[in-house]
Image (spheres, helix red, strand yellow):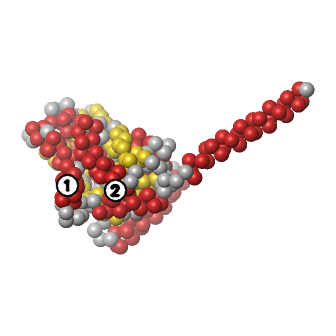
Amino acid sequence: MIRRTLILTTLAAALSLSACGRKEAEPAASGPPTELVFSILSAENQASMQPLWQPLLDDMSAQIGVKVKPYFATNYTSLVEAMRFKQVQLGWFSASPALQAINRADGEVLGRVVDAGGDATYKAVIIVRKGSGITLDKVLSCDKSLAFGIGDTQSTSGTLAPKAYLFTPRNIDPATCFKTVRAASHQANVFAVANGVLDVATNNSVGLIFAARENPQIAEKIEVIWSSPPLPESSIVVRKDLDPALKEKIRQFFLTYGTGTDAQADKQREVLKGLAYGGFRPADNSYLNPVREMDASENLAAARRSGDKARIAKAQAEFEKVSAEAAATRAANPAAP
């Protein structure tokens, strides 16, 4: 009787697992989704960002025939993890987190942003309070007298670019260079510098445009003392496993948005103006090669500091490989950063 009971129990468990397997597989065969979630970094704050993005998402919903709702996050890691765990299917990513989404969250670049002037790049900047007398030489003196504000650890302009282009080439570690180092959003750093809470901070050229528009009195109190070389602008990233037909509809939506000559296109251009964008252009993962190059440069610098010969050799080989790929992309597209 005991043996028979065990056999029946085992069979029941096997049938249950088989049913679960069929149930889990069903959504994959159920066709395109009926709703998409679009992730957006609340670089300023959700209250100010949602009115700017919602009209575009509404237009996307109407054109692709699938409801698109926003997902706002306050840091880049949340955006990447949300895509990794399939909580979002697409989103607006700045360059460094876009690369993280490709590497860790099965993402791919579908298009890129161009600014209101038609440029596909922007710049990282270092800001100080106007009239403070703080110069770039003072910042680089590393006398530990200044309070320094950086961006999210995954931020291209707030962290990666200043390190790769300003500090690392001079063998400066910001963690040991300043009196304090504090990570915050670009908006928070603008306010902190303008009000004297921080002496110096990172930001970017687009963030300063938003600051001047939203808080002109605050923006008037800061000045730029360093700018980086051009960086790849933000991109639209989608999950690779999104239905191909739907993915193509999304691509066409972005590439044609605001390009017509009728009243609807005029309205779309007003939406883009609110985002400080000029529109979207085609792009693929190679668009992020400059970020790969910066990452590889930072990894090589860290390896050299470690003194580990094997680690240095590996990082050197990776840097040379990535640099060659980035050079090839620039040669094929001279306008690329």
Residues under numbered marks 2 and 1 in contact, where contact means CB atoms less than 8 Å apart: no
Quick check: 198 left or right of 322? Answer: left
Secondary structure beneath dot 1 equals helix
Quick check: 5 left or right of 208? Answer: right
Residue type at mark 2: give it.
Answer: Gln
Residue at x 52%, y 53% (from the top left corner): 31
Specify the quadrant that holds the C terminus.
bottom left
Looking at the image, is mark 2 or mark 1 earlier in the sequence?
Answer: 2
Residue at x 30%, y 48% (from the top left corner): 58
Disc on res. 267: 1
Q: Which residue is mark 2?
A: 63
Residue 19, x across and y down, in percent: 68, 41
Identity of the residue furthest to the top in this view: 2
Q: For marks 2 and 1, give the CA distance.
A: 15 Å
- Residue 143: quadrant of the picture: top left
Residue at x 35%, y 51% (from the top left corner): 61
Eyeballing the image, is 40 above or below 192? below
Residue at x 28%, y 45% (from the top left corner): 54
Q: Nearer the viewer, residue 31 or 253?
A: 31
Secondary structure beneath dot 2 equals helix
Disc on res. 69: none
Residue 332, x across and y down, in percent: 35, 73
Q: Nearer the viewer, residue 128 or 107?
A: 107
Residue type at mark 1: give it.
Answer: Lys
Q: Is residue 276 visible?
A: no
